[in-house]
Image (cartoon, grey):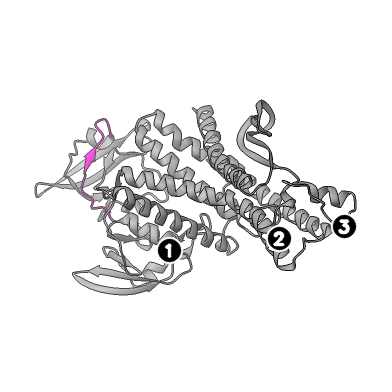
Amino acid sequence: MLILKILLGVFGLGIVVFVHELGHFLAARICGIKVTAFSLGWGPAAIHKEINGVDYRIGFFPVGGYCTMAGESDFRKVYENRKNGVEPEKGDFYGASPVRRMITSFAGPFFNLIFSVIVFSVVMGAGYEFTTLPNRIALAKDVTGKSYPSDRAGLVSGDFITAINGEKTENYHDIQKLIAVNAKKTLDFTILRDGKELNFSIEPELEKETGAGKIGVYFWSDPVIYELKPDGAAARAGLLSGDKIIKWDGEDFPYSAALYKIYKDKEMTGVIPVVYERAGEIFDAEIKMSPQDGGDAGIVWPYIKSKTPDYGFFGSIGQGSILAWETFSASVRGLSLLFSGVDLTKAVSGPVRITYMAGEIAAEGFSGAKISALRNFFEFLALISIALAVMNLLPLPILDGGAIVMFLVELIRGKPAPPRFFFALQTAGVVLIAGLMALALYGDVMFFIRK
C-alpha cells in the first residue's frame, strides 16, 4: 500500500506541475516565443517525438515537467562570456518584448489558479454529503486546564457560536474554517447563551505547529450514544444506542470531548466503569477494553449529516471561483505568518510529505468510498495547485514572480538589467529557495519519524 500511495502521490503532483508548465507553453506559443522542448517528467527522455520544432518528451522520473524556450539561457552565456548584453534571434525568449515575457511567466501560476477553479466548480456542481457537528462549543480550558483566547474573552462551555464577523456559522465546520484562516486578526463573535444573544471580540492565536488560528474550543457533542460498533467494547458491555453517559471512569461526562480531559495523561485501557441513563433509569456498566480495541470503545457520538446545495451550472462556477479565491487569499495570508513564530519544520510541507499526503488521500479509493476519495484527492490537488501558484508569484529571482518584476523594471527603464546584476539576483534566489527546500525536507523527515 505504501508503494501505491507513493505512485498515486507522484501522479497527482505530476498533474499540478504539468498544468503549470502547460500554461507557460501555450502562452509562449501565443506570444511568438519558440518552444524547443516540452516534457512530462524530469530526467532523460524515455520517449520523445519532435512535432513542428518542439521536442515532446516523457521523462524517466515522472515528477513534474518543464517547458524549455529558445534563448532562455542567453543571459547566462552573456555573463560567462563577459558580454554587455543579449543579442537574441527572432523567436527567442529575450527577443520578445517585456510584456510578452511577463505574460509567458504569469501564465504558469495563472493556469494553476484556473485548474483549481475548474476542480472546485466540478466538486460543487456534483455536490456531496459531509458530516459535521453543531455550532455548540466546549472550552478547551475545561479540558486541558490551560487558558485560551475563548475563555479570556468570556465564552463558556455550552455556548452556541452563531456568527463570526457577520457570517453565519451553522455548524462546527463553519467555525473551524473562519477561525483557522484568521490568526492574529480580531474577529466579532455572536454567541447564543441561555436564549440571549451576546457579542464578543476575540483574536485567534497562531498555532505554531500548523500556522492556523485557534481560540481554544472543542466541538460539543451530547454524551448520548448515536451508534455502536457491533463488536466494540461498549456493545460487549451491553450499552445501546440512545443511552446517555453520565459518568465515565468516575468523572462527570457532560459532552463527548470530556474524554480528552479524562485520558489526557493516560490511555483508555482495562476495565472502565460507566454510569448511564436509559429510559429515565440509571444503570452501571463496565466496559472491558482489550488490546484489539486499540483504545476505541466503539462508540459513535451524535453528529450532523449535511449536503451541499444544488448550485446549478453557473452557480457552481461562481462557488468554485469563490472557493479558489478564498484559498488563494488564505495562502497569501499564511505566508505572512510563516515568520511570526511558526515552527517551520512542522507547518511547511516539502515535496516528500505532499506526495505522501496526496497518495494517502487517493489510496482511500482502493479501500472503500471511491467517490469520496476521488473528490478529496482532486480537492487536495487544487489546494496544492494554488499553493504552487502563490509560491511562484513571489517576487524572488528564479521564480515566475521574480522574472515578472525584472521584466517590469526593464519595461520602465527601457533596457534590460546588466547581466552581472541579473546573475547576482539569480544566485541569491537559488540560495534562498535551496534553504527553504532544505528546511521543508527536514520537516518531512521529522514528520515521518514522528508518524
User: Earlier along the polypeptide chain: callout 3 or callout 1?
Assistant: 3
Image-based side of 435 in relation to 447, left or right: right
Circle nearer the viewer, 2 or 3: 3
Q: Quadrant of residue 42?
A: top right
Q: Residue furthest top?
A: 47
Residue on which the image places disc 1: 146
Q: Quadrant of residue 366?
A: top left
Give the numbered dot on residue 84. Answer: 3
* In front of the other: 270 or 214: 214
Give the numbered dot on residue 406. Answer: 2
Q: Which residues are magenta?
A: 220-232
- Residue 193, how many percent across, how many down? 23, 69
Image-based side of 89 in relation to 134, left or right: right
* In front of the other: 50 or 16: 50
Q: Amino acid at mark 2?
A: Met
* In front of the other: 152 or 315: 315
Give the numbered dot on residue 257. Answer: none
Q: CA distance from mark 2 to mark 3?
A: 17 Å
Q: Residue furthest right?
A: 82
Asked whether residue 348 appears in the rendered view, the answer is no
